[in-house]
Image (cartoon, rainbow, N blue to C red):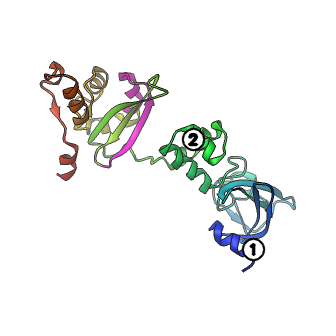
Amino acid sequence: MRATSLVKQMLGLRGVTVTEVLLGSGILVIKLRLTRSSLVCPKCSYVTRACYDTRTLDSRWRHLDMGAHQTWLSCQLRRLRCPTHGVITEAVPFARPVGESRFTRDFEHLVVWATAKMDKTTVTRLLRVAWRTVGTICERVVAEELNPNRLDDLFVVGVDEISFRKHHNYLTLVTNHDSGKIVYGAEGKKAKSLDEFFNDLGKERTANIKAATMDLGPAFAKAFREKAPNAQICLDPFHVVKVRHEAPCIPAVMKGHRLWDVAASQRS
Ligand SMILES: [Zn+2]
């Protein structure tokens, strides 16, 4: 098997042919050619066979490392005239439009996955990318992958805060208990941290929330009492057990509140 064929199989990318492989000190450059002859607009997928001009653009993208080598893909791209977006560089199947990102989608998804599993400093060292780049990639991927319907069919939600930077900063998160997925996040841990959540939700969907689990603090309860009066405010078991361990008697704040059994609600 030729080296280019072997590298093409290792890349696992569709729609490209490997034309050359260059190995430098710690850097692997893989030159590609698109297999399709037509040109595709990267913004609207408009397809044409007509090149706008004879100029080509040599573009590079950082891809998943191969062994100890940092891997870059290189490809000559043409330009087309899209009826909607004007003169634009053609799309590639493995990355976002030229000018938006210097990384392949596979690499960006790896960065996002790693960021969800480990701290940002570890991600920068492991994947050899700049601190700021990690944040930019996460913003880009989340904006694209975020489900626009995530706030539909919310009936039982959980709200809680998590801290970062050694308890100096907080994020308020709202979870859909039916799907187990986080549907909203905002900085802070006060009642106003939920303002945008209720704004995005709107009156009709807010009225559908029948229960909200939360800690024993007054902030989230205040927000739900004001904005979602139909929702039964429940204490989630984690905070109740935590308080019970720390205090020998049941605090007054717990009396009169319902406990929400998430597992039982999902079984029913
Ligand atoms: Zn277009």
Q: Which residues are magenta?
A: 179-198
x and y percentages locating residue 49 in the rendered image = 75, 68
Q: Identity of the amino acid at label 1?
A: Ala
Residue 183 counted in the magenta span = yes
Q: Where residue 122 is drawn, which disc sits there?
A: 2
Q: Is residue 42 above or below residue 5?
A: above
Bin the neighbour count of mark 1 within 10 Å (Cα to Cα): few under 14, some 14-19, many 20 and up: few
- The quadrant the N terminus occupies is bottom right
* Depth check, front residue: 50 or 128: 128
Q: Is residue 137 above or below residue 81?
A: above
* Depth check, front residue: 155 or 109: 109
Residue that lies at the very extreme toward the right in this rendered image: 54
x and y percentages locating residue 74 in the rendered image = 77, 59
Residue at horizontal 60 percent and vertical 57 percent from the top: 106
* Separation (CA) of disc 1 from disc 2: 33 Å
- Judged from the image, the secondary structure of the residue bearing numbered disc 2 is helix
Q: Is residue 194 above or below residue 23?
A: above
- N-terminal of the two: label 1 or label 2? 1
Residue at horizontal 37 percent and vertical 22 percent from the top: 190
Image check: 213 left or right of 31?
Answer: left
Image check: 107 left or right of 234?
Answer: right
Bin the neighbour count of mark 2 within 10 Å (Cα to Cα): few under 14, some 14-19, many 20 and up: some
x and y percentages locating residue 111 in the rendered image = 57, 48
Residue 158 counted in the magenta span = no
Image check: 7 left or right of 238?
Answer: right
The quarter holding residue 160 reads top left
Read off the residue under disc 1.
Answer: 3
Q: Identity of the amino acid at label 2?
A: Thr
The quarter holding residue 68 reads bottom right
- Judged from the image, the secondary structure of the residue bearing numbered disc 1 is helix
